[in-house]
Image (cartoon, rainbow, N blue to C red):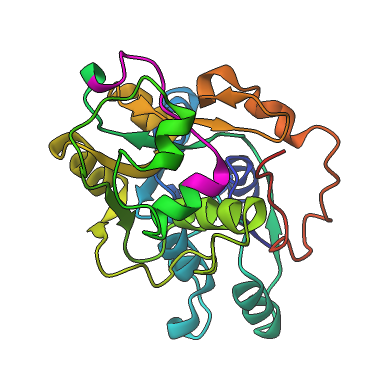
Amino acid sequence: MRPFAAVAAMVIAAASTAGAQPITLHGSGTTNPSKYFWQVMELFRERSRMQLHMTYRAIGSSSGQFEFVGEDNDFAPFNDFGSGDIPMTKTNYDAVKAAGHDMVHIPFATSAIAIFHSVPASAHGGSAIKLTGCVLAKIFSRQIKTWDDAEIVALNPGLSVPANTNIKVVHRVLGSSSTSGTTEYLEGVCPESWTLGSGSTIIWPDDTYTAEGSGGMASFIQDNEYAIGYLDAGHGHSLKFQEVALRNKDGLSLVSAQADIGAAADGTTFPAADADWSAVNLYDK
């Protein structure tokens, strides 16, 4: 049985191959927990009496799933475990099962995808820019194109930007769990304004900007004033990016550091570990 998205995979693999030398374990997938994986792997190497060779490549959730499924390799995986901010898609899950393999999902951490921007602090007094899910949907779909749009100013009366300042919407290319999470959130919270669909890749409006990987997204926001994009919260905070305060279902406008992220999983009933998890999400909880 192959594990997907779990640090517990390391324990399972090490226990089942204790007689082999050296023990190898290779994972790939989302950037979000990569530092966590590297630290845990280093801890294993420091404390193990056996020779260990353990790697994790931060290549994106969809790429991690691709390597885990191994469809173009006669369904022999290119990694020992994959990690993603999103569960295995139903298509990939069904493909693994049809090939005669078993797999499990093992949740091991909760984290946030946050919306970051690069509007100069002088334009909003250093206070968080507030948006609703519907206004964000209109921004990302280019129904709202300027920072002085009436709907944005209504939520941020102190915002003062040059007239008709373009909102530089940047999105990930290739398969991205951050794209999937962001678009699923927008589709769920404001379907009337978000009609571009959801998933790890979608067709974005032509007048948006592209970025490859979390690093590319971070670089674009860092290098371009008046940009807006999405990034795992910890990554954005480490770079001291300004985060949008999104209005939640209780009517509170919060940045991720103010929210109880772990509480999103409270009361959630998860499927059996070896079942299809494609419908599982914790957005706007």
Question: In x, y percent, where is residue 181?
Answer: 54, 52
**Residue at point 13%, 38% (across, down):** 223
Name the quadrant containing residue 7.
Answer: top right
Question: In x, y percent, where is residue 4?
Answer: 60, 56
Q: Is residue 265 left or right of residue 25?
A: right
**Residue at point 59%, 51% (across, down):** 185
Q: Is residue 5 left or right of residue 202?
A: right
Quadrant of the rendering where the N terminus is positioned: bottom right
**Foreground: 109 or 96?**
109
**Foreground: 123 or 23?**
123
Residue 182 included in the magenta stretch of the image: no
Q: Is residue 271 left or right of residue 83?
A: right
Question: In x, y percent, where is residue 233?
Answer: 44, 31
Question: In x, y percent, where is residue 79?
Answer: 46, 61
| Residue 40 visible in the picture | no
Quadrant of the rendering where the C terminus is positioned: top right
Q: Above or below — where is 124 with respect to 91?
A: above
Residue stretch in magenta: 123-135
**Residue at point 70%, 78% (across, down):** 97
